[in-house]
Amino acid sequence: AQKVTQAQTEISVVEKEDVTLDCVYETRDTTYYLFWYKQPPSGELVFLIRRNSFDEQNEISGRYSWNFQKSTSSFNFTITASQVVDSAVYFCALSAVGGAQKLVFGQGTRLTINP
Amino acid sequence: GAGVSQSPSNKVTEKGKDVELRCDPISGHTALYWYRQSLGQGLEFLIYFQGNSAPDKSGLPSDRFSAERTGGSVSTLTIQRTQQEDSAVYLCASSLEAWDYLQQETQYFGPGTRLLVL
């Protein structure tokens, strides 16, 4: 069975602070994909990043960076110099390859950036 | 290009009534998914379509739930005899077909339909 755990239910920081959102996953598959989605107050899930299990390179995209470590089954997300517009619920998700490739989501982390 | 669209945006119904939720995927996306987001259960998978076929219906919570897809495009999720526990946001996503067994395409989500059963 697959499982994704986002232990941080809510995080609140002041603008310009750095913040890291944790994601830990469980799977027996050797090949799988990990995702992060953002859900702003409007409700739509916005895709942020996709990473396959063979690619452990960290990725940076502007103020966003992702740290994938297979040894600890973690795929953490860091926002540098946070901004009020980053306020949203962030979801980490896992998918096996083949078949339906359905996403298994964590419970989400509600991030609030205060001005 | 146009993203995934869903209608209606909001639906209020009385317990026992049937409802239909519609999803228009991104043009050219052969895979289509329905998910449900509720306070108690989080985001959970309901059903997956590849073309007009639904090879994975494992997430449908009861036989009151059904879905179909026609022309490899529009999909309709139908809930019969709605119950209060069906109240949730129903999200549709679509993706390209993976070109290889070991590949996974990104799922793009629509804005959802917020269903309230009174």
Image: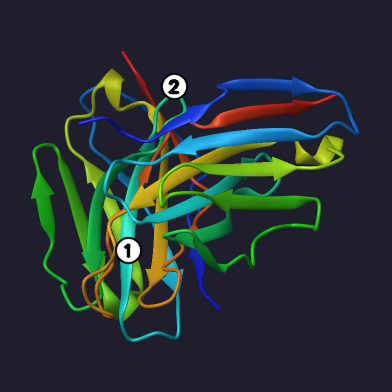
Using residue A9 as the reference point, say whether residue B118 is left or right of it.
Answer: right
Report in which chain the residue with disc 2 lies: A
Q: Which residue is mark 1?
A: A34
- Helix, strand or loop at label 2? It is loop
Q: Position of residue B59 (x, y in %)?
A: 64, 62
For badge 1, the amino acid type reads Leu
* Residue extending farthest right: B16
- Is residue A103 in sight in this rendering? no
Three-letter amino acid code at the position of disc 2 = Ser
- Front one among A86 and B93: B93
Q: Quadrant of residue B22?
A: top right
The residue singled out by tag 2 in the image is: A42
Crowd tier of the residue under label 2, counting other residues whose Cα lies within 10 Å: few below 14, some 14–19, many 20 or above: few
Q: How many marks?
A: 2
Q: Please give the chain letter of the residue carrying mark 1.
A: A
User: Which residue is farthest front?
Assistant: B71
